[in-house]
Amino acid sequence: MRLNHNEFNAMQGGFKEIIHKHLEMRTLKNLGLEITGKNVLEIGCGSGYGAELLSAYQPKTYLGIDLMPEQIRLAQQRNINNSQFEVLDATRMNQLNTPPIEEIVVFRILHHIPEWKAVLKASAKKLSPGGSIYIIEPYRYLSKLADLFLAWQHPPEALFTTAEIREEMHQLGFATKTTSIGYGFAMQGTIASAKTD
């Protein structure tokens, strides 16, 4: 779903980017994120700050997708070398014409998507055998507090627990590792060599 006006404005720069750079990227690296020379897809790329951070590790290719055209316009204005951005619903990744995707990165976006299970399933199909998805998400209670006090309006269907997303990933054939980051969790899932249906 689209971010509402309040959350869209809150997600542009500032404290969010400090956390993104100094906590979330370090956490993903500790979980095993290694994208140098690989084909990378970022789901929910927003205004492109994640792409800036990821580009420092010199992926072979980078593609960022987002449902909101206004976010994609902001990302394109960053003029990041060797990066492409596309307006796309993440449940429709089968429409992408890309080289084999070896790493997928998701920074705090699944809790906005009612069909989050479909996104994970599409990710499992899009990844090359042995590829990994790296996910950062806030804890459910914080999303509920943001809805209560900031009127961010997260879809109730997407307010999953860490255990629920881990179970869904295991059913799709991912082996997972999870760590806490205070306000939420980071998870790495590596897909087995066999593809899911």
Image (cartoon, rainbow, N blue to C red):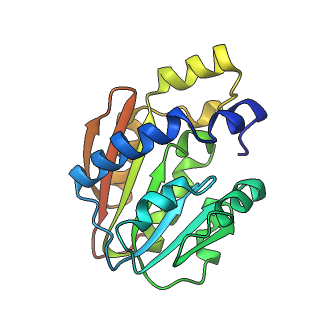
**Compared with residue 106, is residue 37 higher up or lower down, i.e. above or below?**
below
Q: In the displayed structure, does residue 29 sit left or right of residue 14?
A: left
| Residue positioned 37% across, 74% down in the render | 58
Determine which quarter of the picture holds residue 32: bottom left
- Residue 197 in sight: no
| Residue positioned 65% across, 15% down in the render | 148
Percent x, y of residue 39: 42, 77
| Residue positioned 43% across, 67% down in the render | 55
Which of 73 and 128 lies nearest the eye of the viewer? Answer: 73
**Compared with residue 56, is residue 14 higher up or lower down, i.e. above or below?**
above
Q: In the displayed structure, does residue 26 sit left or right of residue 91?
A: left
Q: Give the number of callouts.
A: 0
Percent x, y of residue 67: 70, 56
Percent x, y of residue 180: 29, 33
Determine which quarter of the picture holds residue 131: bottom left
Which of 116 and 182 lies nearest the eye of the viewer? Answer: 182
**Compared with residue 109, is residue 159 higher up or lower down, i.e. above or below?**
above
Which of 23 and 44 lies nearest the eye of the viewer? Answer: 23
Percent x, y of residue 60: 40, 81
| Residue positioned 50% across, 22% down in the render | 142
- Residue 112 in sight: yes
Which of 145 and 54 lies nearest the eye of the viewer? Answer: 54
